[in-house]
Image: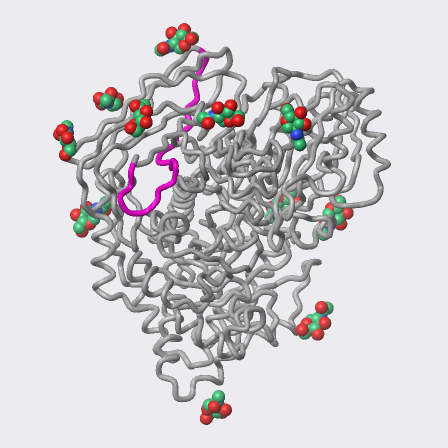
């Protein structure tokens, strides 16, 4: 990789403009680069090409190693080593992985170690680790210190199983609710995504003994999240102002403040140019403008896709040549099928192309550098005997439990809760499984991966007090016979908990064929799949107190019928303690404190509904800066653009009062101070998320969202207790990009401070800001 002086200067300038934030020095020792360079000089063409690919499925589903297949692929794909099936246990995988890795170190000509690069969503991606909620749930906690603890647990568990590089954090801004991978993401607001992403990278890439990065991270997917129709792989449109202000904001923050070691290309073509060969987005924007110095990798089969799905390359080799020329430096190519991997096709493409040789050298250098930085050449392999002293430690499980409690949002409560019911009818397909996401090492039907709501309720209330009736299937069927059983159970118990949602489980899960959410899914309808709404309606018609518990990595339409439920929780994609947490929240042992990071739409077609839409997106309703009440936008009977449960929304059993909001600007330091006093005016302990939004009242150049989040902090208060909350915001954080340049106009601004993005939950304060130049 070339590090031009220009890039280093650009990075230094960016830092200079962050007077209120921590300044992180960009200059890193180039010792690793020197070692990588001297290794590169000894490598043959075949060895170089081999590094850029890998063997992605070490073990089959039954934990067996297929040596024939390994020996076939190894000569041309030997840079990284993936572990394969998530349902193999760490105690089985690590000894075998170690043997393969040790043999590579001992016997390969240059002794270049494998690196294990894996997904890392709810935890490690083989069985035996601590299972956290997926990112959408963890973000709903709005609790960055707790998130940092969770990621530190995952980091140590990854290291214990020999993983030094993860395919996270996802920085996709999820303003398209039909997209099936929202559960893996942090939410619809770019600032929030950036904060979680930054915390993730700084925690994972912490330096350990010897100054080695503990676990390298991968920002993904550059750029994505808003594909047409929410379809996985699909194209997206948008000019450079949209890309910068809506999609790149998290990347810009994370690159500047955390310097992650790698980034993954998205499957999209952006403005028709496939990202995997988008030299403009990689070289001109990512490297030159944003100063990114890490490695650029493909998404799985991204090179193959350019030829076979997009028809934007005439052969696999043509696609590979274009990819490396654009700046791709490593290929992820599961499931290790040689016919879909692009890099090996370059083995016979060397002749006559100095450009290709230079591109490949640069790629191999970048890849080796990460191997050096993460200590693979210098540290020994993890000891399988020590798995038990790292995985699932009591303190790790406690952090996961706390995260599950805070990762659930209470969306409605008419006063029924908190309540410890005498008898409960638990109803619905999600009552007795774990719904954790398509990249979670969780068997939805196996109690070893966590307690379902049914098991947790039986533990808490006594098994004689809880009945379970599935009522209907996860997906469409003709069989509605279970609904009458559910109605009878609700009548009999006099208290119903209905567990509905959208299924997202990993490959080889017993329910895999019934999934409706996760990678490869788009949601034509944001209601509940199959007969679930019918089941809910029938139970609600009974008229007994009813709690609706929603599960899935997506926003759902809660129609007027569903809203009849006395109380509603969204649990997103669950960690292993989600069942227990729901019981604790229902009974009031724990006070709910999660908040939505994706707005809940009124109708499937009534999108976009992200809270931070542009003023013109409100249609004719110019009644102030109130994003969520647009009567003229849709004329379907009774349909307004009102989003009753937008971003930042979530209820508590106590009440909070915000008072004395002030915003002041210090012209000398270009810093803005926001103060507010928060008081718990109810009678139980609770946690509230103080949220600060803003907008320049007029923007002289391009449109700016009706409001935009700029700070949040979660505060826990005893009844009657109050706390002053204080934020310092650098002026550049109020800026936006016009044709790739940051600007922040002088003049009047409105700041809103409160408990959600809803107008009625916010206090507005106007302030005039002076001239500012980047
Ligand atoms: C950054 O580097 C400068 C110059 O080498 C040094 O003076 C400063 O202390 C460093 N700051 C941090 C936060 O490491
Ligand atoms: C092992 O891999 C070889 C080569 O790909 C394949 O032909 C064979 O079926 C595999 N064996 C098993 C048991 O899956
Ligand atoms: C490149 O050169 C090698 C060795 O001369 C030859 O075997 C190979 O077929 C050539 N490949 C192409 C694509 O021309
Ligand atoms: C780790 O713990 C498991 C479960 O308690 C036990 O079966 C296994 O033998 C332990 N392994 C080692 C290496 O101590
Ligand atoms: C998942 O768990 C169920 C229930 O214990 C079991 O029957 C099934 O074999 C498991 N599936 C896998 C792939 O481990
Ligand atoms: C929002 O819509 C409701 C229902 O149409 C209306 O009563 C209310 O005045 C509107 N509020 C604003 C701020 O426009
Ligand atoms: C619209 O609202 C009115 C008044 O609440 C109600 O009578 C009517 O049924 C609603 N129409 C539809 C299509 O929901
Ligand atoms: C805001 O709070 C800080 C820290 O408590 C204090 O120094 C500052 O004077 C306050 N500003 C205003 C305008 O109240
Ligand atoms: C907080 O609110 C409670 C209840 O309204 C009140 O008694 C108390 O004085 C308030 N505390 C402060 C510091 O304002
Ligand atoms: C802030 O300024 C806008 C535009 O002048 C005005 O409509 C609004 O009422 C002001 N808000 C406050 C809280 O002063
Ligand atoms: C800050 O600058 C603005 C505009 O330049 C000016 O009106 C205001 O008086 C200044 N405030 C302070 C505290 O210097």
Pinpoint residue 729: horizontal percent, then vertical percent.
Answer: 28, 35
Relative height, residue 20 to residue 16 (above, below): above
Say whether residue 239 is left or right of residue 654. Answer: left
713 or 368, nearer to the observer: 713
Residue at the image point whose x is 38% and y is 62% from the top: 281
Q: Is residue 770 left or right of residue 624?
A: left
Q: Ligand 7 shows up in which quadrant of the image?
A: top right
Residue nearer the viewer, 35 or 262: 262
- Does residue 175 appear to the left or right of 444 in the view shown? left
Q: Which residues are magenta?
A: 698-719
Q: Is residue 585 visible?
A: yes
Q: Which corner quadrant holds the N terminus? A: bottom left
Residue drawn at x 79%, y 20% as measured from the top left: 493
Q: Which quarter of the figure has residue 640? A: top right
Q: Nearer the viewer, residue 757 or 254?
A: 757
Percent coordinates x, y for residue 761 in the rendering: 44, 23
Q: Looking at the picture, does residue 198 appear above or below residue 212? A: above
């Amino acid at each position: 990789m070339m590090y031009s002086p220009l890039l280093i200067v650009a990075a230094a300038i960016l830092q200079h403009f962050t007077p209120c934030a921590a300044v992180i020095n960009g200059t890193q020792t180039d010792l690793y680069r020197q070692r990588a360079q001297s290794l590169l000089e000894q490598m043959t063409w075949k060895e170089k090409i081999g590094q850029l690919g890998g063997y992605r499925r070490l073990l089959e589903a039954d934990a067996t190693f297929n040596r024939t297949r390994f020996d076939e692929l190894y000569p041309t794909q030997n840079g990284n080593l993936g572990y394969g099936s998530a349902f193999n246990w760490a105690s089985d995988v690590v000894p075998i992985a170690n043997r393969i890795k040790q043999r590579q170190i001992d016997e390969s000509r240059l002794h270049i170690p494998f690196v294990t690069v894996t997904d890392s969503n709810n935890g490690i991606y083989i069985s035996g680790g601590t299972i956290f909620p997926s990112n959408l749930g963890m973000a709903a906690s709005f609790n960055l210190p707790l998130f940092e603890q969770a990621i530190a647990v995952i980091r140590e568990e990854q290291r214990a199983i020999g993983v030094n590089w993860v395919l996270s954090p996802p920085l996709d801004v999820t303003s398209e609710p039909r997209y099936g991978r929202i559960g893996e993401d942090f939410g619809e607001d770019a600032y929030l995504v950036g904060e979680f992403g930054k915390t993730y990278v700084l925690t994972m890439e912490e330096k350990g003994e010897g100054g080695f990065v503990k676990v390298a991270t991968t920002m993904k997917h550059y750029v994505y999240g808003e594909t047409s129709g929410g379809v996985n792989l699909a194209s997206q449109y948008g000019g450079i102002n949209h890309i910068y202000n809506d999609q790149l904001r998290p990347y810009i923050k994370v690159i500047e403040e955390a310097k992650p070691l790698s980034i993954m290309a998205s499957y999209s073509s952006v403005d028709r140019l496939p990202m995997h060969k988008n030299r403009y987005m990689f070289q001109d924007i990512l490297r030159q403008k944003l100063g990114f110095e890490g490695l650029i990798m493909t998404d799985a089969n991204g090179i193959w896709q350019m030829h076979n799905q997009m028809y934007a390359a005439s052969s696999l080799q043509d696609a590979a040549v274009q990819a490396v020329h654009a700046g791709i430096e490593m290929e992820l190519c599961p499931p290790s099928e040689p016919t879909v991997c692009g890099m090996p096709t370059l083995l016979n493409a060397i002749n006559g192309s100095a450009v290709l040789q230079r591109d490949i050298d640069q790629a191999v250098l970048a890849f080796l550098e990460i191997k050096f930085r993460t200590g693979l050449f210098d540290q020994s392999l993890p000891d399988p005997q020590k798995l038990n002293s790292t995985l699932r430690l009591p303190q790790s499980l406690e952090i996961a439990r706390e995260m599950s409690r805070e990762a659930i949002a209470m969306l409605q409560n008419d006063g029924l809760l908190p309540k410890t019911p005498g008898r409960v009818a638990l109803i619905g397909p999600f009552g007795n499984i774990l719904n954790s996401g398509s990249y979670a090492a969780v068997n939805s039907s196996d109690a070893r991966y966590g307690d379902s709501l049914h098991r947790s309720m039986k533990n808490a209330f006594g098994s004689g007090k809880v009945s379970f009736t599935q009522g209907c299937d996860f997906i469409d069927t003709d069989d509605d016979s279970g609904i009458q059983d559910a109605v009878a159970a609700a009548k009999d118990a006099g208290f119903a908990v209905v567990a509905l949602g959208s299924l997202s489980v990993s490959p080889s899960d017993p329910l895999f064929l019934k999934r409706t959410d996760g990678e490869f899914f788009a949601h034509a309808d944001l209601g509940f799949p199959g007969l679930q709404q019918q089941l809910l309606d029938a139970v609600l018609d009974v008229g007994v107190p009813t709690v609706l518990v929603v599960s899935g990595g997506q926003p759902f339409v809660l129609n007027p019928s569903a809203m009849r439920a006395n109380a509603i929780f969204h649990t997103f994609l669950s960690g292993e303690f989600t069942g227990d947490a729901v019981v604790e929240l229902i009974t009031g042992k724990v006070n709910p404190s999660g908040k939505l990071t994706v707005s809940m739409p009124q109708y499937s077609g009534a999108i976009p509904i992200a809270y931070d839409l542009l003023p013109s997106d409100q249609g004719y309703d110019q009644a102030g800066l109130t994003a969520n009440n647009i009567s003229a936008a849709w004329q379907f009977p009774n349909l307004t653009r009102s989003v009753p449960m937008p971003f930042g929304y979530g209820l508590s059993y106590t009440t909070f009062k915000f008072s004395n909001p002030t915003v002041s600007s210090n012209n000398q330091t270009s810093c803005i101070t926001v103060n507010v006093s928060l008081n718990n005016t109810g009678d139980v302990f609770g946690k509230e998320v103080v949220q600060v939004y803003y907008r320049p009242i007029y923007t002289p150049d391009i449109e700016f969202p009706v409001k935009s989040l700029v700070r949040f902090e979660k505060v826990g208060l005893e009844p009657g207790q109050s706390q002053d909350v204080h934020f310092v915001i650098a002026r550049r954080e109020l800026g936006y990009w016009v044709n790739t340049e940051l600007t922040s106009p002088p003049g009047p601004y409105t700041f809103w401070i409160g408990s959600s993005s809803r107008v009625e939950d916010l206090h507005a304060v106007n302030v005039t800001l002076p001239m500012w130049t980047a």
